[in-house]
Amino acid sequence: MTTALRDMIANPTTAELDLVARYGMQPADSRRERLFEAFSRTGLPHRRLEAWKWTDFKVALQGLDRPSTPPAQDPIPHAGALVFRFSSNGYFPPDHIPDGLNVFEKDEAQALGAAEDVPLGALAASLSGGKARPATLLLEVTSKELPRLHFQFSGEGEANFARVVVVVRSDMALTVSESHLGGAGLTSSVIEFGLQKGSTVNRAVYQRGTSEETIASTALVHLDADSHYTQTSLAFGAKVARLETRVTHQEPSAKATLNAAYLVGKDLHADFTTHVRHGANSCVTRQLTKGAVLNGGTGVFQGKFFVPRTAGQYTDADMQHKALLLEDGAVVFAKPELEIYADDVECAHGNTSGALDDDQLFYMRQRGLPEKTARALLTQAFVAEAFAEAGALEEVLRAEAEAWLAAV
Amino acid sequence: MRTMLKIENLTATVGEDDDAKTIINGLTLDVPKGEVHAIMGPNGAGKSTLSYVLTGRDGYEVTGGSATLNGEDILDMDPEERAAKGLFLSFQYPVEIPGVPVMTFVRAAMNSQRKARGEDEISAPDFIKQSREIGKALKLDAEMLKRSLNVGFSGGEKKRLEIYQMMMLEPNFLILDETDSGLDIDALKTVADGVNAMRSPDRGMLVITHYQRLLDHIQPDKVHVLSKGRIVATGGPELAHRLEKEGYEGILGEVA
């Protein structure tokens, strides 16, 4: 079996052979096999695949190595939150689980819809498990008043994989945060959210890594009628970091808000990819992505709204991506896409990238602000707009962005 | 020495290399302490260019002559250094800065200037008190000062906000570039009251305007006519009235 899978990956790299070996050590499980098969069709995704043309994990991850530096510090407060920590060598759930949250630690892999579309998600789902952690951590939310759930992905080794499924029952509410802190050559996590009728989720995602780490965060979000999903992400990139979110509006009048900011320095790469399917009438999507990139850094934005002919009527969707190239040598790739077959929809998108505005800079300097301060203040204000819906974590994300900009 | 702003035989170009055009062409001007001088001139005379050259905007190159403020050469300074020396430009078109609240901006500007001069930062309570008093005098809504700088403000509000910043920062030399443009009569009066309150024996002002209207409210000590990048006529306030009556062509025809 393992041999057959190995054969599926064309010209496997050392890292891919290592992943096949890791799969071989997992308990036999037909769903796990199906997941690893989905990954094996492409192997580590690479530039010859349209969806990965700017973010090449195959080249970035030649072998699975432990980074020379420890994982990044977690800026998201743990106090008052229910923290689930996934490290390379273990899984650490909270000591106490309150009423309103049911936790199921499954030894078996769970099927993943669209596994072929998310090869690194399929990989995470197939390699999560063994002695160190549940194959799937399944959480059921039956309360509106749970403390914030916090998932920390912070490795101490070559690789770190996790699979989480969160079901939010009708009319319930959840606040959730995630920190993707590297610490392993490859960290890949896949988290699914099922929002039942009238429920709400507010999710904040923080990612930080080094040029020795590759990080993939895959989120699949299914929205039932009248549910509301809000997501705010802040990524600093890694050797390559991909934060991918796929949202399906599967019943009418659901709403998704997807905000993100990437701040990328030298030798780092951050990729935000989103796919939103308006598979039901009268659903709303609001998406704002802001980026700021320094010399030697790369930012990627790929956004797609898909609106089928009959199901997607009365869609109201807006996608904005704005990037600042802070220095010569900064690189931003952007691909906003609207694929619309329904005829009664409002879909808009905007996409800009450029330098800071000279008129604004001169105005601020004329009032006495040194150029560096003026640039930092303008960039902070530009980026901070992306954090407006993050609730209690808005200030944390903003402070992280400000600290980065102050050090530029 | 009473002279505050001293400009001698200044020439400056706009644009890059081969496309550079000489806009200021041998301009000489003295503004002593305590005086208000008006510069009037037709479109294209170089009025706004002069304000940008004096404040150090990129894209304007000084090719000859000198400009000093209180005896110090300002032309080699960065814009922020000139600001810290007390030079303030009230913009013809104040710039919108989304996400930066007015008070945050002004406090950062004030403290940057103070730091550059080796002074202590202003305390938050002192800043708020001063802001409240000046805002009230200029009929600025307190809520407005918490909003993003100039974003969504009317033309009149933007100009009043320029005066607010001027009064907060207490510069010692003011350049007002077409401050009357876009103002109705009431707003013009409020703005002029603010400027007049800034008049002092220790402060100089250069009021750049196309029309004489503003000078009914801000009485200049001297009026200069700018044409083709140099001062071609100088007189008292009556010169502004003559310009209004006879037009630039009348006066310029006479001096040419």
Image: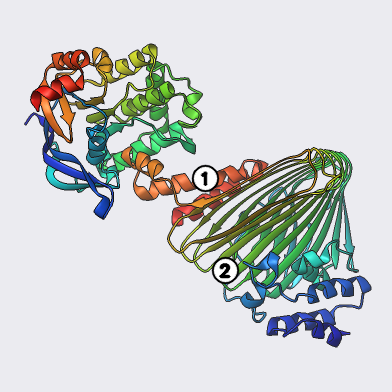
Query: Which of these two is toward me, A80 or B118?
Result: B118
Quick check: can you spot residue A1?
A: yes
Q: What chain is tagged by disc 2?
A: A
Q: What chain is tagged by disc 1?
A: A
Amino acid type for the residue under numbered disc 1 = Phe
Q: Secondary structure at mark 1?
A: helix
> Which quarter of the picture shows residue B127?
top left
Indicate whether B63 appears above or below B98.
below
Query: Which of these two is toward me, B36 or A46?
Result: A46
* Residue A64 in the image, given as x and y percentages of width and height: 67, 79
Is residue A191 left or right of B141 when viewed as pictured? right
Name which of mark 1 and mark 2 comes first in the sequence.
Answer: 2
Residue contact at pointers 1 and 2, CB within 8 angstroms: no
Circle number at residue A210: 2
Q: How many marks?
A: 2
How would you rate the neighbour count of disc 1 (Cα within 10 Å): few for under 14, some for 14-19, many for 20 or more?
A: many
Amino acid type for the residue under numbered disc 2 = Thr
Query: The C terminus of chain B appears in which quarter of the rendering?
Result: top left
Circle number at residue A382: 1
* Residue B160 in the image, given as x and y percentages of width and height: 38, 22
